[in-house]
Image (cartoon, rainbow, N blue to C red):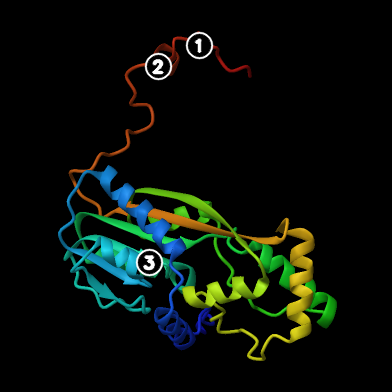
Amino acid sequence: MTNAPNLTDRKALELHRTRAARSPVSFLHESVADEVEERLADVNKTFTSPLLIGHATAPLKRLFPGATQIDDAPVLEATKNHHDLALHCFGLHWADDPIGQMVQSRLALMSDGLFLGIMFGGATLNELRSSLAEAEVKLMGGLSPRVLPMGDVRDLGGLLQRAGLALPVADTQTFRVRYPSLAKLVNDLRDMGETNALATRNYTHVSRRLFEETESFYRQNFSDGDYLVATFEVVFLTGWAPSETQQQPMRPGSARSRLSTALGVPEKPLKR
């Protein structure tokens, strides 16, 4: 049995993140950090041994001074049963094995520890994806992998249960950003560390003609006046390391009162 090909060129991804750290564009990560802070405040639990995994940028690091930080390598260098919070930062969309990353994160958690994964979802850069595809088909008669494929939130939520995490929740927050040019969008992606690191990417540079054709299609179909609109869909995946103290769902048929009584409406039998 042969191994499946890797999705990501890990060396290229590391180089992109290192380059981005020198002149980071952090407006999106600032907003995500604010959202994480609000979510953890709602949990009403103090976390004393957090673990940051992956692309933890300055806004997220500031929330957890002194936290343990590790790379999102295929094998996580994390101590088992040691942390009460595992924050997987902007790495799961690059993972060849996202379930494996979640399983290892769960194993690093103490009983009733919280896993919170932050990743880009399927609607991210849909405008750029469509524009590049149209330009390539027109100029070259085919497509090459230039934008990372990303998962749908419904599918991603199912991964939490498969990874053995309890009380799983998956939800999204969408950001729409306006850019004066395609070059500015590409520069921001570079300074976020999110440019093309696909293992199957085309290694030739994007030609000027392809770039111009992409921007032309983008302006015709995804513009807001003089600005290009770019979508960033951030997916938040939440789950808990199993614990006997957690609430458990009731078994089907174990309810002691009827829903119609609680709602104050007459009950109507189903017609057969």
Dot 1 falls on a residue whose secondary structure is: loop
Residue behind mark 1 = 267
For the residues carrying marks 3 and 1, which lies nearer the camera in this image?
3
Q: Given the image, on which type of amino acid does mark 2 rest?
A: Arg
At a point 34% along the width and 23% down the height, the residue shown is 255
**In the rendered view, would you say 66 is above or below 171?**
below
- Between discs 3 and 2, the one toward the N terminus: 3
The answer to whether residue 52 is seen in the rendering is yes
If the image is split into quadrants, where does the C terminus sit?
top right
At a point 65% along the width and 62% down the height, the residue shown is 126
C-alpha span from label 2 to label 1: 9 Å
Residue behind mark 3 = 89
Residue behind mark 2 = 258
Residue 132 location in percent, x, y? Answer: 72, 73
Q: Quadrant of residue 228?
A: bottom right
Q: Given the image, on which type of amino acid does mark 1 rest?
A: Glu
